[in-house]
Image (tube, rainbow, N blue to C red):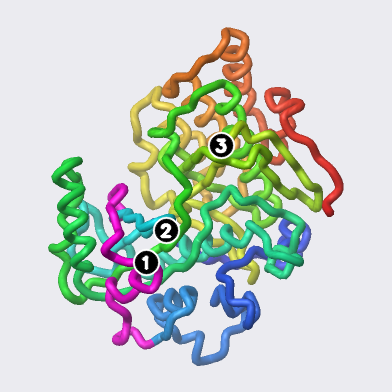
Amino acid sequence: MRAHFAEVDEFELAEESPLPPGARRQDDCPFEQQLGLEEAPAPEEATLTPLQQLLKLCGQELITDKLPSMTDLLGQHVDLTQIRKIGEGTFGEAFKAGKVVFKIVPMEGSRLVNGEVQKLSAEILAEVAISLTLSELRGKPGGSGPFGNSNITSGFVETYGVGICRGAYAEALCREWHAWDARNESENDPVDDFPGDQLYVVFVVADGGADLEHFEVRSFKEAKSILLQVALTLAVAEEACQFEHRDLHWGNLLIQRGATGTAHFRLRDTSIEMADAGVAVTLIDFTLSRLNTVTGEVAFLDLSADPELFQGPKGDCQAETYRRMKKATKDHWEAHRPETNTLWMHYLADTMLTLKKFPCSSADKRELRNFRKRALTYGSCGELVWDEFFSGSWLAGAAS
């Protein structure tokens, strides 16, 4: 699959997405420089290799033969003796220390990893830009961020940073990988097999809790809160930067208990509050996502290059959702089609009905079934949040 930054018409951006997205917290330089996507780069910048573009986006020096080791890069954030493996995927490995999570993805190498070709720098650029941009939707005091305070949500994972490193896998992580393998029988290749010149991209993010697959939903009230928080989060991002997640299965929705009782959002300068039922949601993994950047480009992944994504079993809701997305976009993935977000809301409602077990009256179950059906009729989550299923669940008022 190919990741892209595509130019969009400036007038179209001004009309449809007036609020620029952001990236890293580097308040001493303009946001366009932080994101590394200036529309009119200096001549020397125009000749940057994809790897150098990625390094610039991550805020690192552009000298590719002086990259930090994995031990040095991760050691800037945590004590590596405290790190533990928490999961894996074909992309690579996930580790955690304290409240910090590391997603480590090998890149640019010639060997297959977990049966897959390693991603190139050009393919990773879009995901990094999207991750950094969405983290900025959390807002800043005084509205100093690239979004100001018009559209705010804490529903996207907070990205502390993204870095590129080179070398063998850190010894502490190798030991933990094998300990996890002994307990869980890993499906991935051993990480100590990587060569000494291997490149990696490391996403450093906040811990958002357990994914929906493993989270125990205890009541219909919790289920409705989870769905509404996701819908409002997507609605805010649709408005701010024409965002589509495009892969919001139950492994990419994190939930944790201990929420404050009220979840806060801001949408088009309107303050929104809702009772959170004691749970908070976090959306993760933007590999397939799409949004408009602050510099008049579109960051997206061309899913037409991955036909296998749409060949899942018939009747499986996740597989059907990918096929519905393809139909909605007409297999043109650059354009903004916010109905793809509502397709994933349909999937999540179906997941609550068919895969999660919690006390639920027949009336509640009927209400959820009807919402699942109606979710397919909306053109965006900005529309879907007004569905009768959420009636009385959120309050709107003037922004302070």
Q: Position of residue 228 (x, y in %)?
A: 63, 34
The residue lying at 68 percent from left, 68 percent from top is 146
Mark 2 and mark 1 in contact (Cβ < 8 Å)? yes
Which callout, 3 or 1, points at the residue further toward the start of the chain? 1
- Report the residue marked by disc 1: 78
Residue position for label 3: 279
- Could you say which is closer to the camera, residue 102 or residue 58? 102
Q: Is residue 313 above or below residue 361?
A: below
Q: Amino acid at mark 2?
A: Val
* Residue that lies at the very extreme toward the right in this rendered image: 398
The residue that appears at 51% across and 15% down in the rendered structure is: 359
Q: Is residue 37 visible?
A: no
User: Is 57 placed left or right of 16 in the picture?
Assistant: left
Quarter where residue 383 is shown: top right
Type of residue at label 3?
Answer: Val
x and y, in percent, of residue 139 in the image: 67, 60
